[in-house]
Amino acid sequence: MSIEIRNLSKTFNRKGKEIRALDDISLNIKEGEFIGLLGPNGAGKTTLTKILTTLLLPTSGEAYIDGVSIYDDKKIRSLVGSVFGETGGRSLYYRLSIFDNLLFYSTLSGIKKTEAKKRINSLLNFFDLESKKDTLVMKLSTGMKAKVLLIRALIPFPKVLLLDEPTLGFDAESSEIARDLLMEFNRECGTTVLLTSHNFPEIDDLTSRLILIDSGQIIQDCPPDIFKESAAQHYVHLVFSLPSFHYKSFEDLIRISAGAEILFFIEKDLDNFVFEAKIRPTKFTLNETISRLTILILRAGGEIFQIAPHMPSLKESFLAFLAINKQKDEKAQSFEDMFSLPFQEEE
């Protein structure tokens, strides 16, 4: 097991008020998994990451990384690489150059100087910073500081990477480069990655499992595709004709034969019986619903001019998740029921 969390809680006192940032959470992450951690601001994501990097102590509970307790801070720091999305680069030494910063932190990680220099030069070249290696950190742009912070985390080839908004301040090209590199570390080195980000395409591209946290509690744990299918509406956009048409009969056919429901319907061309509709699967998968709709219309002597599936993006799904979660107390309904999804069982 790479990361094991047991009944972890963290409470802060602010102006005499107790705030539970984490509320008795338990979680297992296997070695080599690439996990996306999502949740609204203040959900507890950064608190969890900081506890796992020994920057914060929990109020109660326990966590282990590669079998080592988080209370053994020296051993944990030798296993973990971390980035906290600080665009100012506050954890770098401003009066040292990029190279000297990275060499200093490599020494702290116990890497021999000759090996450290090889890794530093290779990573600087990867991020197109080699020509800037002698530049003082105080003279760097926000994006360059963010790159240096990510490089610093990668130099020790850590067993576990805990990344909180690691590409904050990156331009589009640099973000793509970072994604490729993180995927390479995960695939080739077997590095376990826990990624917190509001860059939804980044989370969608990289992760194989999503953990959603809100109010300090784990709300859902499932693969991204299952979450997207369940959290937001997916539908078929259809432009078609039928020689003989009655809306109620068509609605019944859609429900009975295609296992679907009509979300949107307009008459595009009354003279030629051309219609446009958005149809949501309720019984079958999206692909099977498309097949059934196609057969239904063609058998009725109709013609299909356009048929296109719409799968919600991770961002759409996340916003739907937030909307549903806000109503959970009012409806006294569990999130599991809302999504009609079982929680992922831990092995």
Image (cartoon, helix red, strand yellow):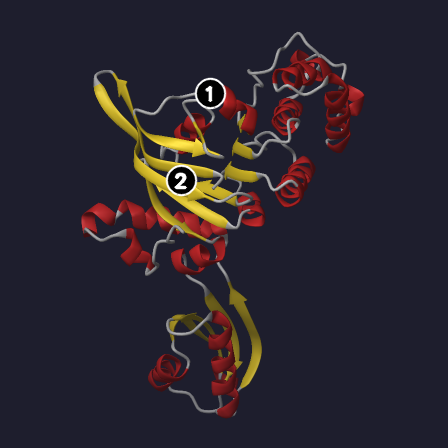
Comes first in the chain, label 1 or label 2: 2
* Residue positioned 48% across, 76% down in the render: 288
Q: Position of residue 101 (x, y in %)?
A: 67, 15
Please identify the quarter of the rendering in which residue 115 is found: top right
- Of residues 313 and 207, which is closer to you in this image? 207
Q: Position of residue 341 (x, y in %)?
A: 35, 59
Please identify the quarter of the rendering in which residue 136 is found: top right
What type is the residue that disc 2 sits on?
Gly
Helix, strand or loop for disc 2: loop
Q: Position of residue 36 (x, y in %)?
A: 49, 43
- Of residues 250 and 160, which is closer to you in this image? 160
| Numbered label attached to residue 39 | 2
As displayed, is residue 79 above or below residue 223?
above
What type is the residue that disc 1 sits on?
Asp
Please identify the quarter of the rendering in which residue 139 is found: top right
Q: Is residue 180 left or right of residue 317?
A: right
Identify residue for label 1: 73
